[in-house]
Structures are given as C-alpha cells and as structure tokens.
Amino acid sequence: MKIAILPGDGIGPEIVTQAVKVLNALGEQFELETAPVGGAGYEASGHPLPDATLQLAKDADAVLFGAVGDWKYDTLDRPLRPEQAILGLRKNLGLFGNLRPAILYPELANASTLKPEIVSGLDILIVRELTGDIYFGQPRGVRECPDGPFKGQREGFDTMRYAEGEIRRIAHVAFQAAQKRDKRLTSVDKANVLETFQFWKDIVTDVHKEYPDVALDHMYVDNAAMQLVRAPKKFDVIVTGNMFGDILSDAAAMLTGSIGMLPSASLDANNKGLYEPSHGSAPDIAGKGIANPLATILSAAMMLRFSLNKEEQADRIENAVKKVLAQGLRTADIYEAGTTKVGTEEMGNAVVKAL
Amino acid sequence: MKIAILPGDGIGPEIVTQAVKVLNALGEQFELETAPVGGAGYEASGHPLPDATLQLAKDADAVLFGAVGDWKYDTLDRPLRPEQAILGLRKNLGLFGNLRPAILYPELANASTLKPEIVSGLDILIVRELTGDIYFGQPRGVRECPDGPFKGQREGFDTMRYAEGEIRRIAHVAFQAAQKRDKRLTSVDKANVLETFQFWKDIVTDVHKEYPDVALDHMYVDNAAMQLVRAPKKFDVIVTGNMFGDILSDAAAMLTGSIGMLPSASLDANNKGLYEPSHGSAPDIAGKGIANPLATILSAAMMLRFSLNKEEQADRIENAVKKVLAQGLRTADIYEAGTTKVGTEEMGNAVVKAL
Ligand SMILES: CC(C)[C@H](C(=O)O)[C@@H](O)C(=O)O
Ligand SMILES: CC(C)[C@H](C(=O)O)[C@@H](O)C(=O)O
C-alpha cells in the first residue's frame, strides 16, 4: 500500500515526521513517498502543487498531509499561494467528502473556553462537501457591474452552485456516518434565502427516504452557528456545503479548545482519501519542536480506518493517544498545571511506546 | 417625527408594546403608526409585506420592528413566507448598514455558555452589509447544470456580488463606528477563495487611507468564527458582507448567552433606519407574557440615537435598562437564582419607572 506523504510548510514537516514514525511502528508494510506541497512546492518548482506531487497523490492509496501556508507567501499572486495546493488536491482527486470530528477528550475539558458542563463529552461529526459550492463555481471574477444602482462600476462576483448528484452523494456519506453513530443528522442550509440551499434541502430530504433509521432535521446556518455555542452536545452529525462547512467546522473545532487534537479525512467516491490535521501551519512556532503532533497522528489513524481498511491498527493508534493523555503528557497548546509538558518529538515517541 | 411600528408575529406584539410604552414615557412628541408585517401581514392582506406597510415604512422617519415568523407559515411558497418581509424592507428602504452590538452586561455574565474570564466585559460591534451579496445577487434559481461532471442534471445556483460603491459605503460606516470606539476594525473576508471577497479586501484597504487613526486588519471568515469562540474580547468592530455577517453576528450574540438583550439597527445612507431585536419571534412562548422586551426597548434607544437625533433620550433608556438589571429584575430567559423573575409587562413597567 502506497501512501503519499506531503508535509508542507510551517509545523507541517515536524508533525508529519511523528505520524510517519507511528505508522512505521505498526509493523505493517507501507510504501511511503514524500513530496513538497504548498510553499515548499513553490520553492521546489515554482508552483504550490507541483505536477509530480499531484501525480504521486493520484497514484497513492492515501495521502497524509501536514499543513500549508506562511506569511512570506502572502504577497504572491493568488494561484501561486500555498492554500491553492489544498484546493487543487481536493478538486483533482475528487475528494468531495470531508469528515471533521469535533471531540473533547475528558482529560482536556479545561482547555475549552466554554463551561465544562456545556462541552464535556462533546463528540460531533461535521460532514462538509468539499469540491462544489461557491469554492469552485463558474463564472467568477471582477467585471463591470451589469445592472442596478452600481451599474458600470467594478464588481467582484462568484457563483454558488450545487447539482443534484453532488448533493446526493454527500448526503449518502452523512446518513451512513450517522447510522454508525447516534443516528441523528442535521442538514445545515440557508433555504430561506438561497436557491442553492432550498434545492439542497429538497434533495437531502429525498435521500432521507433511504435511511428511515436516521432522524433528519434541517437548520439555518445562522441558527447552527448559535446552537454550536449554546448547546453543541445536542448535535450528532452535521452535513452542509463547502462554504458553510468551512465556517462551522472551524467553530466546532474551537469549542473543544484543543484544535491540536483534531484530525480530518477528505474522501473520494471509493474511500481513497487525504488526511490532515484540522489546524493550520502555525509558522510562528515552526521549527521550535513544540507543535502538537496528535492531530496528525490521529489523521493517520483515520487513514488506516477509511482508506487502508486497517480498523484494528486505527484503534491501536487512537488508544495509544488516549493513553499518553491519561499519562498526563501534554504539548504546550494543551498544557495545564499538574501535567507534564513535552515537545513534538517526545509526544510522538510516547505514542509509539504506548502502541 | 413619525415612527412606523411593525410588531409582526410570535412575541413581536408583546415586546413592541413595551418599547412603545417606554417611548411614550419620554415626554417627546412622536407620531406612532402601526401596521402588520410577516405572518400578520399575510393574514391581513395575503402578503408578508403589504403595500400599505411598505408605504408607511417609507414615509416614516424610522421603523421599530418586532419579529416575524411562525411554524404555521412554513408550508407557504417562499415569496409569501414571513421572513421575506424583512428582506423586502431592507432592499426597498436601502438599509445597507446593519449594526449589531454584542455586549455582555456584567450582571448577566453567568448566562453565557463561555467561561466568565473569556466573555466578561465583552463589547463588540458587528457591521454587516445588508442589501447586497448572495442575498440579492442575480441570476439565481434552479436550472439544468450547464457543464462539468453533473451536466444535464438539475442544479440550484445563486450569485454572490459586491460592487465597488457598495463596499465603500459599508466600509465608511464601519470605520466611522470604529472611530467612536476603540479604533480597531477587523474586515472579515474569504479572499483566499472568493473573487468577491478579494475585491472586498482591496476596496476596504483603499477606504482605510481616509481613516489613518483606525487600525485595520483582515481575517478569513473561518478564522473569525474560531476567534469569536477563542478570544472574543480581542475584537472591537467587525465589518463583513451580508452572508458572513448573518452567521458571525448570530454567533457573537450567542456568546453573551443573553440574546434577549441585544438590539440592532439597519441604516440607509441618510441614517433613516429600521430597529429590531437580534432575537426571533419565538412562537413557542408567544402570548405567555414571559418574553424579554429589553432588546426591543434597547432597539428603540438605538433609534433615538441614530435616526431621531435624540442622544440624551437614548442614554436615558439605556441607563434605565442598566438600572432594572442592577435591581435584580430578570425575565425567564436571563433568570438565575437570587434574582427576581418578572414577566414582559412588569419588565417594561420597571424600565418606565427607572427612566
Ligand atoms: C485554506 C483554505 C482554502 C481552506 C478552505 O477554505 O477550505 C481551509 O480553510 C480549510 O478549511 O481547509
Ligand atoms: C430571516 C432571515 C432572512 C434573516 C437573514 O438571513 O438576514 C435573519 O437571519 C437576520 O439575520 O435578520
């Protein structure tokens, strides 16, 4: 089994190194091949997603991704900026199904900015559509405003779109995920304002007929943003579009106060996937050896479960992570008095030992 | 001075009655005229925004609005649903500047789901553009998908657009609001993905030249959603588009835990405005006499300040509200042990007495 390793920028290389160490310690035969992406891709060959990197990702059975981005690339033209690599990988690999768990580990309950009774035991899953919506819709650009009171001025514009089949396939992913959990699905839309999301709501309602064992409800995106703050534990699985999912999944992650712990999976129609931590490249702490590698290590576990069909090995890693937390080991981002502060490498070693 | 009073549905009439009582107690000469809107407009004349109601709103110097919506209208065709009234009023009256303060009153610090140290003293202002963006952009609808892998299927679509002048005028509102506060403005965009918001960012940056005393920063919307949860007090004024503003202003309101306290103003180019509580019509508690009228009373105060040029009377109302809170009076939504629970009318009477 071939895994493409794309460390990227900032803390990416450090945290991916630890995840690779954990993978290698499992006693399985993986073929790991590394390639530059993001700012590193730009440095290496003038483009954030070099052809060779994309080809490697296409050929592999799964992709383990670190993080991309650094302030020093902020002045590049948009198509050359690091984050275009992640958009390009999603689109080219057809990774339409993004699974983002927001879980609060009992040992880390204090890390949240929310009161413990509101978030302790939090375990929600956000299913975000990842290759459609206003992220990729054409036409888009800057043009002369064609009508209305600002006619003749310049205007920026984008197109939000969702085709029926696009909604159906992500709805199936979400209903099936809900079946494996508490069997409750909330579809988040803005059907009171947007045609796209009235259509979304209608299609999701239709797909629901195939999943009578799952309870479906619909919620407007503004209300969902409120309910995530007010009573996040009421959610089980949330499904939504690319743009709303971008916002809500980050808000949900931050509820836990420990975004350094949260993995994510982005899957295609055949469960090939790209796996990455939910956090970013944190250039401010890059190279200091203090970044939390656990989100990346847990992303590797998701990879074993969803793409490589190694459920048991995934469990082993997840249990090892729980064990090091129980042992009181903490990187700086989740440190609190009474626990033991460790660096990136020590944390990776501890997970290997706990396997 | 003529004020249009549009109570609407659910708890709308009850809370507006209290705000009107407070206005009448100020000793000023206001001409108040009431008209049905939302579900009540539909009942009265078959449309959520009856012509006579729109005309009244146009003729008035300001509009005091309650809330609209009730489950019983959920099955109506979209153009007939209550919330279309609020979209119609915004568009027809040119109310492009939405001011939504998120303030946590010290007496209500416990109401928040966030830890006191994270939110106590919270005082941020969200400036949301209200007549543009994907809310009104044409074309929109359901059509045959013209290209790509889903070609030929049905697809829902909408258009996000912002013209230069539209961005400039809301930026001016936001910079001027920041000048009266802590002189810090965060412009929220998604310039890394959307053409509309790269353009937005460029124009806001340009308008900044006229406000050298205000510190401007730019933040992606997903990050803004996270920072609102992580460290909301770091914000002073936030400016953003209609769609992102819808989501972020509701999230910010919920941080306080006391959305029943939060007023809002929607202003046109001449400071004529519509004033409404940030919460909804709460049909589940309508008619029970337990709704919190303070957000509507504080909306009346905003109306006096922004549209009617009666700063002193606005201060009087705001101080009266602070006084009743200090007296320990609480409606059910903000009640906690050790305070005195009161109903909608008692709360209104207490504010009048405290004037
Ligand atoms: C980097 C950016 C383009 C990306 C997105 O908006 O999807 C990121 O925020 C994410 O959620 O993975
Ligand atoms: C009712 C709805 C159309 C409206 C909006 O989305 O603007 C509401 O959520 C608001 O924020 O006032």
Image (spheres, coloured by chain):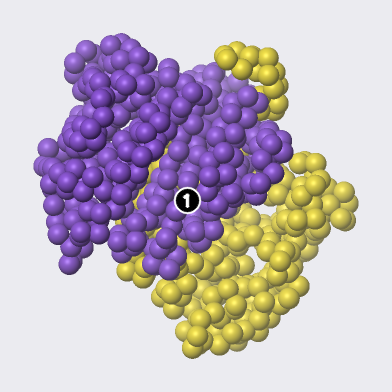
Chain colours: A yellow, B purple
| Residue drawn at 65 percent across, 84 percent down | A346
Q: Nearer the viewer, residue B297 or A202?
A: B297
| Residue drawn at 37 percent across, 33 percent down | B310
Element carrying mark 1: strand
Q: Is residue B150 visible?
A: no
Say above or below: A204 vs A10: above
Say above or below: B144 vs A108: above
Give percent across and percent down for residue A223.
Answer: 37, 44
Mark 1 crowd level (few <14, some 14–19, many ≥20, 10 Å Cα): many
Give the letter of the chain under mark 1.
B
Quarter of the image holding residue A200? top left
Say above or below: B197 vs A312: above
Amino acid of disc 1: Ile
| Residue drawn at 79 percent across, 52 percent down | A73
Determine whether the beta carbon of the residue marked 1 sits less than 8 angstroms from the nearest atom of ligand 2. Answer: no
Q: Nearer the viewer, residue B104 or A34?
A: B104
Say how many tags the image has: 1
Q: Is residue B316 found left or right of A82 in the rendered image? A: left
Q: Nearer the viewer, residue A33 or A188?
A: A188
Give percent across and percent down for residue B334.
Answer: 24, 55
Q: Quadrant of the C terminus of chain A?
A: bottom right
Q: Quadrant of the N terminus of chain A?
A: bottom right
Q: Is residue B52 found left or right of B242 in the rendered image? A: left
Give percent across and percent down for residue A53.
Answer: 79, 53
Q: Is residue B145 visible?
A: yes
Give percent across and percent down for residue B147.
Answer: 63, 24
| Residue drawn at 25 percent across, 25 percent down | B29
Residue pointed to by mark 1: B124
